[in-house]
Image: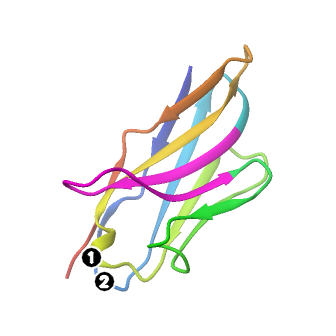
Amino acid sequence: QVHVEESGGGLVQPGESLSLPCEVSGNIFSINGLGWYRQAPGKQRELVAVTNSGGATNYGDSVKGRFTISRLNAQKVVYLQMNSLKPEDTAVYYCNAVGYDINRRPYDVWGQGTQVTVSS
């Protein structure tokens, strides 16, 4: 099995920064993609940022220039650095990992989510 776990959420004031780590563990052969998504109350889950094994990244329009996704080479941890946070960034943030397990079966696993609240 493959397991994904997020951490680092909390309450911050507008303009502040927060870093969210996400760790992938289990019977992993490869991690082909790692991403962060978020869901605010009453809204659909949306893309925040994704990165692939080649290091390419893609960001949602609302976070471009403020958020950065990063992953150290070969590590099973991905970070979401969030700067200049706004109240509209308030949501549950979910980490997602896709790849192949040690039996060469594909996986697409989500974490349980971590709450980020931006409020004064």
Residue 49 in magenta stretch: yes
Q: Position of residue 78 (x, y in %)?
A: 61, 53
Q: Is residue 36 above or below residue 90?
A: above
Q: Position of residue 15 (x, y in %)?
A: 37, 86
Magenta highlight range: 32-51
Q: Residue at x 41, y 58 (%)?
A: 8
10 Å crowding of disc 1: few (<14), some (14-19), many (20+): some
Q: Is residue 10 above or below residue 92?
A: below
The secondary structure making up most of the magenta span is: strand
Which of 77/101 is in front?
101
**Would residue 101 appear left or right of 49 to someone viewing this image?**
right
The disc placed on residue 113 is none
Give the residue at x 60% y 26%.
Answer: 107
Image quadrant assignment for residue 116: bottom left
Where, by quadrant of the figure, is residue 89 drawn?
bottom left
Quadrant placement of the N terminus: top right
Name the residue beneath numbered marker 1.
Answer: 87
Q: Position of residue 96 (x, y in %)?
A: 52, 42
Residue underneath mark 2: 14
Q: Residue at x 53, y 62 (%)?
A: 80
Question: What residue type is disc 1 on?
Answer: Pro
Local secondary structure at mark 2: loop
Residue extending furthest toward the bottom: 15
- Which circle's residue, 1 or 2, is located before the other in the chain? 2
Q: Closer to the observer: label 1 or label 2?
A: 1
Q: Are marks 1 and 2 in contact (CB under 8 Å)?
A: yes
- Specify the amino acid type for callout 2: Pro
SS of the residue under disc 1: helix
Magenta region includes residue 23: no
Answer above or below: position of 90 versus 8.
below
